[in-house]
Image: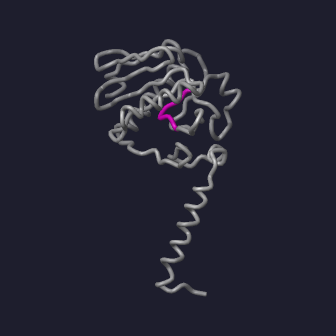
Amino acid sequence: MLATTSESPKIEETALLATAAVQDNLTIEDFMANPPDNMEWVDGQLVEKNGATLKHGKIQSSLGCAWANYRTFSKQGGEFYISPPCRTNRQVRRPDVAYLTPELVAQFGDVPTLPQSFPLVAEIVSPTDIAEDVFLKAQEYLTSSCQEVWLVFPESHLVFVVTQNQILGFRAGETVSTQQILAGFTIAVDELLA
């Protein structure tokens, strides 16, 4: 049977409803097994990770490359990722940049979603982000096996390094350094945010 023009919207509506129903029935385990691109699992809902700009992408790439180059130079091993999915105690998040130690690469290197937080993560704050939410996300990572979170505020030219015991702030003209993971890495805030 051929669909007439008046029947087409009903067919499209049915397809959209079927897609929504599949997403509504998606469990966190399903999400972890096959994580959709640019999506996070937050409070039982699929949430699109948005707000990225060209500047955001440039900083994300620069930091990832700097961490990866230092890892190679210092022979510390491990792997770097851009927006990889990882499970926290309650959610599945996608940090902008993440580092996995050699030991964790050996243990989890091929899983579709890391079943814990990465030891070192960075979030580049987008213009649409709320600062309170960004710091809460850092705490979420830290309660899920993460040891160090970098919060990069491009417009304010600030970088906060958050660990279980401290929050350090760095601004333009200063040099930010890792505190617990990827020992010895430093980068000028101006270079990172250039």
Query: Taking 153 as reference, is 110 left or right?
Result: right
Residue closest to the far right: 107
- Residue drawn at 66 percent across, 25 percent down: 104
Looking at the image, which residue sits at the far top?
184
Q: Is residue 127 magenta?
A: no
- Quarter of the image that includes the N terminus: bottom right
Q: How many marks?
A: 0
As drawn, which residue projects farthest toward the front? 43
- Look at the picture and state if 86 lies above or below 148: below
Part of the protein shown in magenta = 94-99
Q: Work out which quarter of the rendered image holds the C terminus and state it.
A: top left
Whether the magenta-drawn stretch holds residue 97 is answered as yes
From this view, report whether residue 194 is shown above or below residue 169.
Answer: below
Q: Quadrant of residue 17?
A: bottom right
Tell me the residue at 46%/44% (across/down). Answer: 49
Please determine whether, in this image, residue 17 is positioned above or below residue 91: below
Instruction: Decide which of 79, 155 is in the foreground and name it.
Output: 155
Q: Residue at x 47, y 84 (%)?
A: 5
Q: Position of residue 70 (x, y in %)?
A: 50, 19
9 to 97, vertically: above or below = below
Q: Nearer the viewer, residue 105 or 134?
A: 134
Judged left or right of residue 122, residue 74 is: right
As drawn, is 53 to the left or to the right of 112? left
x%, y% of residue 143? 56, 25
Asked which quadrant contains residue 108, the reply is: top right
* Nearer to the camera, 89 or 65: 89
User: x, y percentage for residue 170?
Assistant: 34, 18
Residue 149 image point, x, y percent: 48, 24
**What colouring method underlies this structural image?**
one colour
